[in-house]
Amino acid sequence: MSLLEISGLSISFSGLRALEEVSFEVRENEIFGLIGPNGAGKSTLLNCVSRIYTPARGEIRYRGESLLGRQVHELPALGIRRTFQNLELFRDASVRENVILGAAFRYRASGAADLLRLPASTRGEGAAGRRADELLEALGLRSHAATRVSALPYGIQKSVEMARALASEPKLLLLDEPAAGMNPEESRRVGETIRALRAQGITVVLVEHDMRLVMGVCERIVVLDHGEKICEGDPARVRADPAVIAAYLGEETEDA
C-alpha cells in the first residue's frame, strides 16, 4: 500500500529547472532511498513534500489525500516529520531540551492548562521528558543530554536532530543526509537506527550521499539527475544502471 505518492512533480527557480515531471510512490513501512549527484533536486523534492516549496505542477498525496493545500505546521499532526541538510536546532539549548521540544506537539496540553499549570500540563511535560530520555538512550546520546548543542561535533548534532524528529512519533520520516559529517562507525549506527525505525512501523525516505549506507538499508531507490528521474529499483538494479553510473562519474569529473 502506498503511503506517499509523487506524481508529475515540477518546479523551477528563476527559470532554472529543479524538478521535471518526477513521479514515484513510497510504500507503507518501507525504507526508500532518494539519491543523485549534487544539485539533482533531492532536497528540493523533500521541501515540496514538507510544504516549504509549492510545485508549479504535479501532485503530492499522503495516505491518498493531497498535501498541496497543507501548511508546514500542519504536517506533524498528520504524522510527517523531517530533518534538514543544514541543521535546524536550537543551538543554545541542551540536547535534551531540543528533543523535548520535538515531543511537545504530541504531549502538549491546552493553552489554558499550560497557563494555569493544571495537572494536564504537568502530565504532558512529564510524558515529553520520558519520550526524550528514551530517544537519547536509543540513539546513544544520553551522555550528551545536558550539553549545549553548539558545543557538540557536527555528526552528533545530526543525531540530535533525528532524535527531535522522532520525538513526536511520526509515521513518515524524511531524512536529509543524516550521516553527513559522520565517520564510518557513526554512519553504521545510523543505518542500525533506520532499520529499527522500520521495525517500529515508521516509513523512511532517505536522502544521502553515503552509498554504503543507502545500499545497505534501502529496499527501493529513486535516482535523480538534473531534476529528472533516471532510475528506480532495488539497490542491485540501481548500482548497475548505466545512466546512474554516468551521472555519478560526471559529478566526479566536475569535482576533479
Image (cartoon, rainbow, N blue to C red):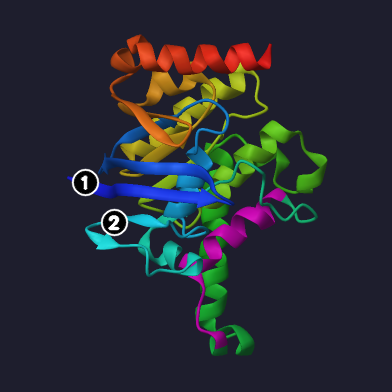
Query: Which residue in the rendered view is the most extreme toward the left?
Result: 1
> Depth check: 134 or 235 in front?
235
Counting labels gives 2
Disc 1 target residue: 2
> Depth check: 84 or 46 in front?
46
The quarter of the displayed image where residue 90 is located: bottom right
Q: Amino acid at mark 1?
A: Ser
Q: Are marks 1 and 2 in contact (CB under 8 Å)?
A: yes
Q: Secondary structure at mark 1?
A: strand
Task: Please give left or right for residue 201 compared with residue 168 in the image.
Answer: left
* Residue drawn at x 52%, y 38% as measured from the top left: 138
Q: Is residue 69 magenta?
A: no
For residue 178, above or below residue 100 = above
> How would you rate the neighbour count of disc 2 (Cα within 10 Å): few for under 14, some for 14-19, many for 20 or more?
some
Q: Nearer the viewer, mark 1 or mark 2?
A: 2
Q: Which residues are magenta?
A: 95-111
Q: Amino acid at mark 2?
A: Arg
Q: Secondary structure at mark 2?
A: strand
- Closer to the chain start, of discs 1 and 2, is 1
Q: Dividing the image into 4 quarters, which one contains the N terminus?
A: top left
Disc 2 target residue: 61
* Residue drawn at x 82%, y 41% as measured from the top left: 151
Q: Main secondary structure of the magenta part?
A: helix
Q: Is residue 102 magenta?
A: yes
Can you give x and y, in whole percent of width and height, for residue 85 in the image?
61, 41
